[in-house]
């Protein structure tokens, strides 16, 4: 009992309870299944708030630790070890926050095999939360690989026309990286005699030439997940084909698992290699920022546009992380949250309109703002947040990252930051271009097309507004008063940056 | 020299099962044709009793029959696994052979005899016994492969298996002869003694290599795998299920014991050979599996590929510091493979129709909508074969790759994980068809089949969450081996 009642264990595995309930429900009871899933994920969110209240922001170390011996035979030393600190708490909260929102968004969008959908969705939440909490490499790997399975089904069963291709591509791409990480994990386990991350960091005596190889193996897993240019090609396919809720979680949380991986494992485990690699990662991040923005602008499909914008935004996160100073890392963590909120919201909004029109071609839209004023306004706010307008959340994150990158000793060259700053301008171009095409100007042909079949395009309904409002609250809150968010992570970030051997 | 009761004690499970099988052969004559279920029940009873006896022997260490057979942790572990495989083989066959019209009592007795051979293999401490056991386990399998006579595929499978099996036995015998020539004994302990006093001779190396070739046929390692897809496809599916696990377990058990105890002195020469054999088996097995459209052939190539993974456990055998670990990892992987494999074949049997219909992967379309539990079970097995959480397959690979990396063979480990990635592609195709394509599959509902498949799915998941007990057993099993 004591094992199950640990706050972090409870937070991770609570959705399993929902899975068990749904498993025994008749698949025809669609609404009841939806409610069970929603309530389960809301309770998990409640637990995450409870965890937040117990979290001591001034303590840089792992807190609320649940640690039990798991496999300690035959030369193995594997523990069930969960813990939370300033690096992970915001991501845990984001996961618990976005899951109920995503479930709510599927209320009318997913009509087929609702039972299976909710089962996979709740299992996905278990995997994601576990990834952010696990402090043992074996446990982490299990959660990490496990998230692939439900996501694969979500894309493959409920996705768009090319869903099977996208699902398999997503699966194989991600797995290709993780299996190299598996070897590195095993090497660390043999070398250090433990799989515990804090213990391995404390030992910290890995020879520097081997560090580089291990760093690269972990990077293979995380860089594909982020995704960093040039390993991003699975992302547009997966995003475009995934059902809306899948895209929200994919962009909102799954990509963050990659950046979080750098933060939790690469940087503290291989500090020397990290410092050596920083300029290179910064280079790839900068290319990603510019490339993602440019390709976004070229898209005709609005979902693809949002998908490519992720490549650009995540480039900022990587740039911030590998600035390896307090501002850069803190900005990067905040930007992870920002991207989860804004891009998640963009996918939700695109999904809401797609549900009515069944097309994502921007050119057939136009003049939507007049017909759907609430939808237009929400879209404008989210779009502005995504392009980094001061006063909204995106600005705070990107600005802090750029500050960090400009002053970064590890990157050693202000040009990366300077070129990356262009990405902010380019974001404004493609976001406003999208908004203009869809919401301004004369009415597009799709408006008349939808009218032919019924009442025409409707504005957001209550359920959709309820879905969006919490996200909007945070978009403004982080934009106007980010201090409490920075305060949560500051000691942990300080601790992380301090241990790096920056010349 | 006289035999004492202790000698018989060493072989008690083996003797018990052999006697039981002989009695059953006679009893079966009196069981009416339409009541052959009784034979199945009796054979299962025999296996279960023997299993109980085997488990009671955990911890015993004895040799018997003048050092020709041993009873140790290793043999107990492998025997238990073999007996469980036998039980599963009976459970899968029970409804299947009735439905396909090949229900004859001999099926079960042949299966029992084959299990006795496999058990003897696990206890062999003398190359002559290895040879004897090899024949004892193989001959019933040849007959079983052709059991669906007069279906030509089954006859072809039986004949092919027999010819190539006989051929491979030739290699083993020749290898044993050469080893005898070098060491003047076929006893493993004597060979160890010889190798420790004199410098390794070429004769010994060639002998060991020939034994490896012979067993390479049995466990379906590339390039000795050619028979596998045809035999697995042609044999009755229940036979395939049993033989793909049982014969592999026995073959690897013998190889592990012979190589790890008798041949470490020639590791310098053998390691490279084993390295190449493992790499080749993983690469070829997984690559050819991609092109398969028939589920039986797919699983046949998958079984070849897995032989490659298990072979990885042999590669570091010359390194005394990791030898125990890698043999234990090999044992654990055998368990993981057997459990998953039986489950997957159970699903195949459930979908198979008369005349060999229902075996195309395309026939699995729509399975998840109509039979969600069966599709979920198959998904678990596929994930386990890929090596993804939360399945025993992941834990098995974790253990195995650790031993390989600890032995310093990172290159081989990289080949291992990359080929797992390839395997993900074709295993996932089965999942794609089950979940993402529409179809109207029908299945055969049989109690024992359903129970077996369900139990295997549960074991696959549960053991992955609490693997420590099996880890401990596997590692203790090999402690006294060296």
Image (cartoon, coloured by chain):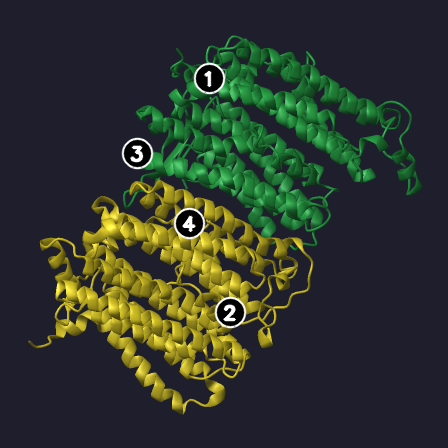
Chain at numbered mark 4 = B
Circle count: 4
Q: Tell me, yes or no, if residue B88 can be seen here.
A: no
Query: Where, quadrant-wise, is the C terminus of chain A in this rendering?
Result: top left
User: In the depicted view, which residue is nearer to us: B54 or A310?
Assistant: A310
Chain at numbered mark 1 = A
Q: Residues within 10 Å of mark 1 (few under 14, many from 20)?
A: many
Q: Nearer the viewer, mark 4 or mark 2?
A: 2
How far apart, in angstroms, are the residues tagged by discs 2 and 3?
Answer: 45 Å
Seen from this angle, which residue lies furthest front? B202
Cβ–Cβ under 8 Å for marks 3 and 1? no
Q: Where residue A381 sits: x, y (%)?
A: 74, 20
Which residue lies under the disc numbered 3? A191
Chain at numbered mark 2 = B
How far apart, in angstroms, are the residues tagged by discs 4 and 3?
Answer: 24 Å
Q: Tell me the shade of chain B.
A: yellow
B156 up-or-down from A361: above or below: below
Q: Secondary structure at mark 4?
A: helix
How far apart, in angstroms, are the residues tagged by discs 3 and 1?
Answer: 27 Å
In the image: residue B145, left or right of residue A244: left
Q: Nearer the viewer, mark 4 or mark 3?
A: 3
How far apart, in angstroms, are the residues tagged by discs 2 and 1?
Answer: 59 Å
Which residue lies under the disc numbered 1? A493
Seen from this angle, which residue lies furthest left? B1
Which residue lies under the disc numbered 2? B233
- Dividing the picture into quadrants, the one containing residue B84 is bottom left
A475 up-or-down from A253: above or below: above
A259 up-or-down from A407: above or below: below
The dot on residue B464 is 4
How far apart, in angstroms, are the residues tagged by discs 4 and 2?
Answer: 30 Å
How far apart, in angstroms, are the residues tagged by discs 4 and 1?
Answer: 35 Å
Q: Secondary structure at mark 3?
A: helix
């Amino acid at each position: 009992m004591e094992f199950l009642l640990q706050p972090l264990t409870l937070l991770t595995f609570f959705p399993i309870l929902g899975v068990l309930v749904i498993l025994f429900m008749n698949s025809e009871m669609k609404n009841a299944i939806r409610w069970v899933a929603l309530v389960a994920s809301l309770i998990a969110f409640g637990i995450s708030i409870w965890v937040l209240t117990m979290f001591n922001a001034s303590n840089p170390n792992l807190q609320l630790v649940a640690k039990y011996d798991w496999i300690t035979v035959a030369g193995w030393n594997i523990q069930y070890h969960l813990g939370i600190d300033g690096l992970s708490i915001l991501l845990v909260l984001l996961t618990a926050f976005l899951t109920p929102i995503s479930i709510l968004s599927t209320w009318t969008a997913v009509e087929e095999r609702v039972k299976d959908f909710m089962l996979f969705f709740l299992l996905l939440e278990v995997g994601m939360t576990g990834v952010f909490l696990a402090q043992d490499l074996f446990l982490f790997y299990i959660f990490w690989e496990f998230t692939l399975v439900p996501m694969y089904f979500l894309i493959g069963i409920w996705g768009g026309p090319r869903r099977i291709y996208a699902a398999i591509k997503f699966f194989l791409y991600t797995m290709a990286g993780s299996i190299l990480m598996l070897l590195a994990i095993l090497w660390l386990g043999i070398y250090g005699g433990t799989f515990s991350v804090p213990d391995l960091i404390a030992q910290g005596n890995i020879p520097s030439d081997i560090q580089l190889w291990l760093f690269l193996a972990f990077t293979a897993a995380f860089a594909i997940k982020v995704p960093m240019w040039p390993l991003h090609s699975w992302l547009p396919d997966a995003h475009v084909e995934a059902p809306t809720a899948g895209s929200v979680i994919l962009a909102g949380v799954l990509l963050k698992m990659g950046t979080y991986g750098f933060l939790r494992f690469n940087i503290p485990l291989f500090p020397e290699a990290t410092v050596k690699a920083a300029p290179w990662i910064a280079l790839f991040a900068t290319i990603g920022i510019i490339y993602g923005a440019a390709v976004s602008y070229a898209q005709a499909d609005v979902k693809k546009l949002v998908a490519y914008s992720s490549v650009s935004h995540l480039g900022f996160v990587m740039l911030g992380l590998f600035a390896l100073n307090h501002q850069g890392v803190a900005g990067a963590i905040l930007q992870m949250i920002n991207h989860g909120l804004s891009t998640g919201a963009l996918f939700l909004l695109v999904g809401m309109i797609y549900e009515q029109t069944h097309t994502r071609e921007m050119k057939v839209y136009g003049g939507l703002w007049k017909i759907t004023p609430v939808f237009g306004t929400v879209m404008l706010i989210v779009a502005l947040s995504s392009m980094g307008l001061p006063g909204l959340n995106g600005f705070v994150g990107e600005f802090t990252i750029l500050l960090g990158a400009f002053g970064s000793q590890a990157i050693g060259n202000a040009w990366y930051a300077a070129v990356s700053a262009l990405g902010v301008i380019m974001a404004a171009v493609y976001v406003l271009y999208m908004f203009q095409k869809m919401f301004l100007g004369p009415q597009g042909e799709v408006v008349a097309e939808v009218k032919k079949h019924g009442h025409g395009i409707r504005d957001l309904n209550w359920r959709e507004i309820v879905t969006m409002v919490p996200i909007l609250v945070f978009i403004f809150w982080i934009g106007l008063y980010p201090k409490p968010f920075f305060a949560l992570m500051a000691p942990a970030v300080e601790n992380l940056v301090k241990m790096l051997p920056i010349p | 020299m006289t035999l004492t009761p202790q000698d018989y004690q060493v072989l008690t499970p083996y003797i018990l099962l052999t006697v039981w099988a002989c009695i059953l052969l006679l009893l079966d004559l009196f069981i009416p044709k339409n009541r052959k279920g009784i034979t199945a029940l009796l054979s299962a009873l025999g296996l279960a009793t023997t299993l109980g006896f085997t488990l009671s022997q955990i911890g015993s260490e004895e040799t018997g029959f003048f050092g020709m057979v041993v009873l140790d942790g290793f043999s107990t572990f492998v025997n238990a696994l073999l007996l469980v495989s036998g039980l599963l083989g009976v459970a899968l066959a029970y409804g299947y052979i009735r439905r396909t019209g090949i229900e004859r009592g001999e099926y079960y007795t042949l299966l029992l005899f084959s299990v006795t051979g496999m058990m003897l293999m696990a206890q062999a401490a003398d190359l002559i016994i290895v040879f004897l056991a090899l024949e004892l386990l193989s001959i019933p399998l040849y007959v079983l492969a052709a059991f669906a006579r007069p279906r030509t595929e089954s006859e072809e499978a039986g004949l092919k298996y027999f010819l190539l099996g006989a051929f491979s036995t030739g290699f083993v015998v020749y290898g044993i002869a050469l080893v005898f020539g070098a060491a003047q004994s076929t006893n493993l302990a004597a060979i160890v003694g010889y190798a420790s006093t004199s410098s390794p001779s070429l004769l010994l190396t060639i002998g060991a290599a020939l034994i490896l070739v012979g067993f390479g046929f049995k466990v379906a390692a590339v390039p000795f795998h050619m028979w596998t897809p045809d035999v697995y496809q042609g044999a009755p599916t229940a036979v395939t299920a049993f033989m793909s696990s049982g014969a592999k377990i026995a073959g690897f058990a013998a190889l592990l014991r012979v190589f790890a105890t008798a041949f470490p002195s020639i590791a310098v020469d053998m390691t490279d050979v084993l390295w190449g054999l493992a790499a080749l088996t993983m690469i070829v097995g997984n690559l050819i599996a991609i092109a398969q459209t028939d589920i039986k052939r797919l699983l046949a190539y998958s079984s070849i590929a897995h032989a490659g993974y298990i072979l990885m456990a042999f590669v570091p055998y010359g390194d005394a510091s990791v030898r125990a670990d890698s043999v234990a990892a090999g044992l654990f992987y055998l368990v993981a493979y057997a459990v998953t494999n039986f489950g997957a074949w159970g699903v195949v049997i459930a979908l198979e129709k008369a005349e060999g219909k229902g075996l195309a992967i395309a026939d699995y379309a729509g399975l998840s909508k109509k039979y969600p539990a069966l599709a979920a079970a198959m998904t678990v097995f596929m994930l386990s074969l890929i090596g993804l959480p939360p399945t025993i397959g992941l834990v098995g690979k974790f253990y195995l790759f650790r031993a390989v990396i600890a032995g310093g063979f990172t290159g081989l480990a990289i080949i291992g994980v990359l080929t797992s990635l390839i395997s993900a592609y074709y295993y996932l195709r089965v999942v794609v068809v089950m979940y993402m394509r529409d179809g109207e599959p029908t299945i055969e509902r049989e109690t024992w089949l359903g129970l077996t498949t369900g139990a295997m799915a549960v074991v696959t998941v549960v053991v992955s969450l609490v693997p420590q007990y099996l880890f401990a057993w596997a590692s203790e099993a090999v402690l006294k081996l060296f």
